Amino acid sequence: MIRQLVRSYVLLVAVAIALFTVPVAFTLTDQLRGDTRSAVLREADAMALLLGDGRAASCQALEEMAKAYDDEIQVTRTAKCPADLPRPTADAALTRALEEGGSTTDWGSSFIWGPELEITVPARAAGTDRVVGAVRILYSTDEMTSRLWQIWGFRAVLAVLVLGVAALLGVVVARRLTRPLRQLNDMASKFSDGDLTARSPVTGPPETQTLARTLNQGAERLDTLIAAQRIFVADASHQLRTPLTALRLSLDNIADGVDDEFVGEDVEQATAEVVRMSRLVSGLLVLARAEAKVTAAEPLPLMDIVRERLAVWRPAADERGVTIALRGSTDGRPSVLASSGHLDQMLDNVLSNALEVSPDGGTITVRVEPRGDVVGVSVLDEGPGMSDAEKSRAFDRFWRGQGLTGKSGSGLGLAVVKQLATDDGGTVALTDAPGRGLCVTITLRASHRGGG
């Protein structure tokens, strides 16, 4: 928009300059032509009078005047004056002067003028109208051309300077006029990045002030509603933990004191559902925290965090004979930009899902791959994998795939991973693992500072 305003402003100034400068330049050019023609014509008429007089003094005066023109004076020999001057070439102009007694002006070109201005005038006998000869002046237009360049060049340079100043002033004015719009755009950009606290200053013309107030009020209302929703989800999830823990303990006590096989199966099924509900509540709490205000990303030692999380999950994997292997740049120390605790939660959710779908005796492979400005962490399992339709829904909340160990997942794991990765400026992708299974790749921005 700034460029359009500046172009429009410069175009208006250019039109104004053209309207006021070009006509003046043409007028000065025409005036230069007229003044030069009049001056040369007066000289030619004066010489014609001397030529027509024919007396010795007049002839001598004619020769003296001709010397000032550097052999650019031509006269006929038909007059009484025996002036030793070049004779003009016989042409239409000379014929007209001798036979018709008319003067002729030839600029030598149809465009402004040529190299020489040629003026031919008749010479009449003293006191009569009888034509006795002719005088022709060949006047060089070099000085006129130099003057022409001064006329147009000065105005061209002046126009360029004025346009340059107009462009600078246009930039200043345009930036000042569009400042309220840029502030509104900055607010919208922050809003799209998840910063619901962004507000726009109420400045500028009345129209932009009204728009800024409306957007600020809408943002305030939206921020309040979303904050209330997050508080509700977090409080509800937190409050549900205690009764669910008590319910599970009660079911465990009942299972210990029941000898009936059928009752024991019911109690075991109820316990599994309570466990799944506990995971669901925990997932809701994590997701509510993930959707809260994003904290600033900081350089984190990737390999240290990966090794730490693998050490936490290996005991659970060992119980089922599942091997967790680390591959990739294990000798390097790549760092990534992430908020504190985000990477831990992402790895926990992905490893939990991988362990959920892995068959007994299978292998979970964790691969770290630096890729220039980003670093990828891939977790590959040997489970049933996902179809393209399932991959398209995998990040939906409460959607659960069919794992080998049942349906104990909460359906929030990958949704949490995507939310945390997005907050840190990263991505999450699902692809097929080589052979069989699913590959979950978390890509985060690399930090060029060394990790601790």
Image (cartoon, rainbow, N blue to C red):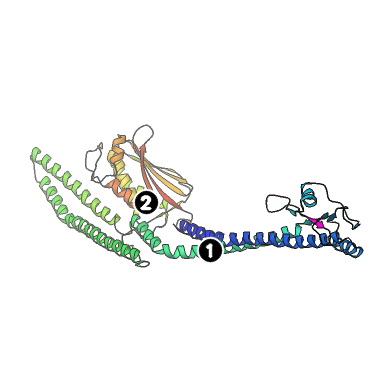
Instruction: Kindly identify the residue that appears in the image at 72 percent across and 57 percent down.
Output: 145
Report crowding for label 1: few under 14, some 14 to 19, many 20 or more residues within 10 A (C-alpha). Answer: many
121 magenta-colored? yes
The residue nearer to you, when weighing 151 against 296, is 151
Quarter of the image where one finds residue 150: bottom right
| Label 2 vs label 1, nearer the camera | 1
Instruction: Kindly identify the residue that appears in the image at 82 percent across and 47 percent down.
Output: 90
- Residue 283's place in the image compared with 324, above or below, is below
| Region rendered in magenta | 118-130
Residue underneath mark 2:
308
Q: x%, y% of residue 268?
A: 14, 42
440 magenta-colored? no
Q: x%, y% of residue 189?
A: 37, 57
The residue nearer to you, when weighing 359 against 15, is 15
Instruction: Kindly identify the residue that appears in the image at 85 percent across and 59 percent down.
Output: 51
Residue 133 seen in the figure: no
Amino acid tagged 1:
Ala
Amino acid tagged 2:
Glu
Residue underneath mark 1:
166
Report crowding for label 2: few under 14, some 14 to 19, many 20 or more residues within 10 A (C-alpha). Answer: few
How far apart marks 2 and 1 lie (CA) works out to: 64 Å
Residue 141 relative to residue 229: left or right: right
Residue 251 seen in the figure: yes
User: In the orientation shown, which residue stands out farthest toward the front?
Assistant: 128
